[in-house]
Amino acid sequence: MCGRFALASSAEAIADYFDCDPPAQFAPRYNIAPTTPVLARAASGLTFYRWGLVPSWAKEISFGNRMFNARAETVAEKPSFRAAFRRRRCLVPATGFYEWQKKGEYKQPYFCHLNHRLFSFAGIWEYWQDGAGNELQSCAILTTAAVGTMAQIHQRMPVVIRHQHHASWLDHHLESTDEAMACIADMNADFEIYAVSQQVNNSRHEGAALIEPVGDK
């Protein structure tokens, strides 16, 4: 799964990576958690989405609190995700994410990254409006079975869309989901991992120290 991640990049680096500018209020973050705003690239450009997808038919925003991940194997069929997968895909930039491995009564957090380079999670987004006219754009990150080093610490991992597949992933005019699924199948991401401080367990903690390596217990 993917329940916490980091985006330790400058606005300039993100603009160069996506060939469009992030919102002026963008700032690097090291402990991004569900229900908070996340930067994502949709077909229309870069903007912020609430992390935790709220389907258009949901009665309350709280419906999305646990909908921050969508399984790649079933995203095209699940009622909460299928419309977004077919018509509203996005790319969620990151420089790494956190995963936890249980060791007895202790859970060791790890930082998982691709040589600390900027990359993109496969995402989907949705538009929601309540009866009072309040609007919300929210998103979820796709996950798949863990492979490579990730399989050592968890059964699931987030899907990464390779840069050459960005345009295909965002193409909401596709009549078939085959090409989108091909983007997922070609992710080819073998993450590097190392242990980090338990400070990351509290989503209120922020700062570059959270991704510094520590001794693995």
Image (tube, rainbow, N blue to C red):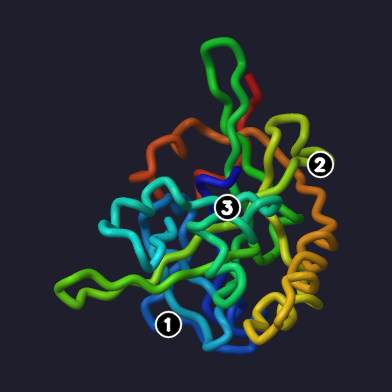
Disc 3, SS: strand
Q: Position of residue 79 (x, y in %)?
A: 51, 57
Q: Position of residue 54 (x, y in %)?
A: 39, 61
Q: Does label 2 or label 3 sit earlier along the sequence?
A: 3
Residue 41 relative to residue 177: left or right: left
Q: Quadrant of residue 13?
A: bottom right
Q: Quadrant of residue 146?
A: top right
The numbered dot on residue 103 is none
Name the residue beneath numbered marker 3. 70
Q: Which one is nearer the viewer's eye here, 46 or 110? A: 46
Q: Does label 3 or label 1 sit earlier along the sequence?
A: 1
Q: Position of residue 193 (x, y in %)?
A: 72, 40
Q: Label 1 is placed on what type of residue?
A: Pro
Q: Residues within 10 Å of mark 1 (few under 14, many from 20)?
A: few
Disc 1, SS: loop
Q: Quadrant of residue 19?
A: bottom right
Give the residue at x 44% y 60%: 53
Q: Label 2 is placed on what type of residue?
A: Val
Q: Position of residue 9 (x, y in %)?
A: 57, 68
Name the residue beneath numbered marker 2. 147
Give the residue at x 45% y 51%: 67
Q: With respect to residue 29, does 150 lie above or below?
A: above
Q: Label 3 is placed on what type of residue?
A: Ala
Name the residue beneath numbered marker 1. 23
